[in-house]
Amino acid sequence: MEKVTALRPCEVVRQDVEAIAEIYRNLGAPTAELMVTRALGELALAMAEIAEKVRAQELRDLAGQLSRLRRLASDIGLVSLSGVANDARICLERADGTAFSAVWARLLRVAERSLSPDPGMADALR
Protein backbone atom coordinates (compact mmCIF):
# COMPACT_ATOMS: atom_id res chain seq x y z
CA MET A 1 0.00 0.00 0.00
CA GLU A 2 1.35 3.40 -0.95
CA LYS A 3 1.23 6.43 1.26
CA VAL A 4 -0.84 9.28 -0.17
CA THR A 5 0.34 12.80 0.56
CA ALA A 6 -2.09 15.66 0.30
CA LEU A 7 -0.49 18.70 -1.29
CA ARG A 8 -1.41 22.08 0.12
CA PRO A 9 -0.14 24.84 -2.14
CA CYS A 10 1.00 27.89 -0.25
CA GLU A 11 1.37 31.04 -2.27
CA VAL A 12 4.09 33.54 -1.56
CA VAL A 13 2.47 36.91 -2.09
CA ARG A 14 4.68 39.71 -3.36
CA GLN A 15 3.80 43.28 -2.47
CA ASP A 16 5.37 46.55 -3.49
CA VAL A 17 5.16 48.43 -0.20
CA GLU A 18 6.59 51.51 -1.92
CA ALA A 19 3.37 51.94 -3.95
CA ILE A 20 1.31 52.41 -0.78
CA ALA A 21 4.03 54.42 0.94
CA GLU A 22 3.96 56.84 -1.99
CA ILE A 23 0.19 57.23 -1.66
CA TYR A 24 0.66 58.03 2.04
CA ARG A 25 3.44 60.54 1.29
CA ASN A 26 1.41 62.27 -1.42
CA LEU A 27 -1.96 62.39 0.32
CA GLY A 28 -1.19 62.31 4.02
CA ALA A 29 -2.15 59.53 6.37
CA PRO A 30 -5.91 60.17 6.86
CA THR A 31 -6.72 60.58 3.16
CA ALA A 32 -4.37 57.79 2.10
CA GLU A 33 -5.91 55.39 4.58
CA LEU A 34 -9.37 56.09 3.15
CA MET A 35 -8.08 55.65 -0.40
CA VAL A 36 -6.26 52.38 0.30
CA THR A 37 -9.25 51.02 2.23
CA ARG A 38 -11.54 51.93 -0.67
CA ALA A 39 -9.15 50.32 -3.17
CA LEU A 40 -9.03 47.11 -1.13
CA GLY A 41 -12.83 47.10 -0.98
CA GLU A 42 -13.04 47.54 -4.75
CA LEU A 43 -10.57 44.69 -5.21
CA ALA A 44 -12.58 42.40 -2.95
CA LEU A 45 -15.80 43.30 -4.76
CA ALA A 46 -14.21 42.81 -8.19
CA MET A 47 -12.86 39.43 -7.10
CA ALA A 48 -16.29 38.39 -5.78
CA GLU A 49 -17.96 39.42 -9.05
CA ILE A 50 -15.38 37.48 -11.07
CA ALA A 51 -15.81 34.42 -8.84
CA GLU A 52 -19.57 34.53 -9.35
CA LYS A 53 -19.13 34.68 -13.14
CA VAL A 54 -16.71 31.74 -13.08
CA ARG A 55 -19.11 29.68 -10.92
CA ALA A 56 -21.94 30.45 -13.37
CA GLN A 57 -19.59 29.74 -16.31
CA GLU A 58 -20.33 33.19 -17.75
CA LEU A 59 -16.93 33.83 -19.28
CA ARG A 60 -18.04 36.28 -21.99
CA ASP A 61 -16.66 39.53 -20.52
CA LEU A 62 -14.40 37.99 -17.90
CA ALA A 63 -11.16 39.04 -19.62
CA GLY A 64 -12.10 42.69 -19.17
CA GLN A 65 -12.92 42.18 -15.52
CA LEU A 66 -9.61 40.40 -14.98
CA SER A 67 -7.82 43.35 -16.63
CA ARG A 68 -9.57 45.71 -14.23
CA LEU A 69 -8.59 43.50 -11.28
CA ARG A 70 -4.99 43.56 -12.51
CA ARG A 71 -4.97 47.38 -12.71
CA LEU A 72 -6.55 47.82 -9.28
CA ALA A 73 -4.07 45.42 -7.69
CA SER A 74 -1.13 47.04 -9.44
CA ASP A 75 -2.16 50.52 -8.30
CA ILE A 76 -1.72 49.56 -4.64
CA GLY A 77 1.31 47.35 -5.06
CA LEU A 78 -0.27 43.89 -4.96
CA VAL A 79 2.24 42.48 -7.43
CA SER A 80 1.28 38.79 -7.18
CA LEU A 81 -2.45 39.44 -7.45
CA SER A 82 -1.90 41.67 -10.47
CA GLY A 83 0.29 39.11 -12.21
CA VAL A 84 -1.97 36.12 -11.62
CA ALA A 85 -5.04 38.09 -12.76
CA ASN A 86 -3.17 38.85 -15.97
CA ASP A 87 -2.22 35.17 -16.37
CA ALA A 88 -5.89 34.19 -16.00
CA ARG A 89 -6.86 36.76 -18.64
CA ILE A 90 -4.29 35.33 -21.05
CA CYS A 91 -5.62 31.80 -20.51
CA LEU A 92 -9.14 33.00 -21.33
CA GLU A 93 -8.03 34.83 -24.45
CA ARG A 94 -6.25 31.68 -25.63
CA ALA A 95 -9.36 29.61 -24.86
CA ASP A 96 -7.25 27.23 -22.76
CA GLY A 97 -9.75 25.87 -20.27
CA THR A 98 -7.31 23.54 -18.54
CA ALA A 99 -4.77 26.31 -17.95
CA PHE A 100 -7.53 28.69 -16.85
CA SER A 101 -8.74 26.19 -14.24
CA ALA A 102 -5.25 25.89 -12.77
CA VAL A 103 -4.59 29.63 -12.84
CA TRP A 104 -8.06 30.32 -11.42
CA ALA A 105 -7.28 28.11 -8.40
CA ARG A 106 -4.04 30.03 -7.93
CA LEU A 107 -5.84 33.38 -8.29
CA LEU A 108 -8.23 32.39 -5.50
CA ARG A 109 -5.31 31.51 -3.21
CA VAL A 110 -3.39 34.69 -4.03
CA ALA A 111 -6.48 36.87 -3.62
CA GLU A 112 -7.20 35.33 -0.25
CA ARG A 113 -3.65 36.00 0.96
CA SER A 114 -3.50 39.47 -0.63
CA LEU A 115 -6.82 40.75 0.67
CA SER A 116 -6.70 39.35 4.19
CA PRO A 117 -5.59 41.78 6.90
CA ASP A 118 -1.84 41.79 7.43
CA PRO A 119 -0.84 43.64 10.59
CA GLY A 120 2.81 43.64 9.50
CA MET A 121 1.97 45.71 6.43
CA ALA A 122 0.61 48.64 8.45
CA ASP A 123 3.73 48.65 10.60
CA ALA A 124 5.97 48.67 7.54
CA LEU A 125 4.29 51.84 6.26
CA ARG A 126 4.85 53.89 9.41
Image (cartoon, rainbow, N blue to C red):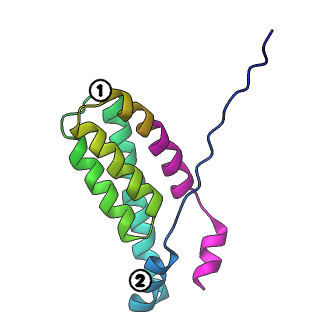
Q: Does dot 2 land on a helix, a strand or a loop?
A: helix
Q: Which residues are magenta?
A: 105-126
Along the polypeptide, which appears first: circle 2 or circle 1? 2
Quadrant location, the N terminus = top right
Is residue 9 shown left or right of residue 27? right
10 Å crowding of disc 2: few (<14), some (14-19), many (20+): some
Up-down relation of residue 105 to residue 81 (above or below): above
Identity of the amino acid at label 1? Answer: Gln
| Residue 120 among those drawn in magenta | yes
Q: Residue 89's quadrant in the figure?
A: top left
Residue depicted at x 33% and y 51%: 86
Up-down relation of residue 48 to residue 83 (above or below): above
Q: Residue 98's quadrant in the figure?
A: top left
Q: Position of residue 114 (x, y in %)?
A: 52, 57
Is residue 39 shown left or right of residue 118? left
Query: For this rendering, which residue is in front, 89 or 38?
Result: 89
User: Which residue is identified by label 2?
Assistant: 23
Residue depicted at x 41% and y 83%: 23
Q: CA distance from mark 2 to mark 1?
A: 37 Å
Q: Position of residue 6 (x, y in %)?
A: 70, 27
Residue depicted at x 48% and y 72%: 16
Is residue 21 shown left or right of residue 87? right
Q: Does dot 1 land on a helix, a strand or a loop?
A: loop
User: Which residue is identified by label 1?
Assistant: 57
Query: For this rendering, which residue is in front, 59 or 1?
Result: 1
Q: Which mark is residue 89?
A: none
Q: Position of residue 54 (x, y in %)?
A: 34, 32
Chief secondary structure of the magenta span? helix
Report the label total: 2
| Residue 122 among those drawn in magenta | yes
Identity of the amino acid at label 2? Answer: Ile
**In the displayed image of the protein, which residue is found farthest to the front?**
2
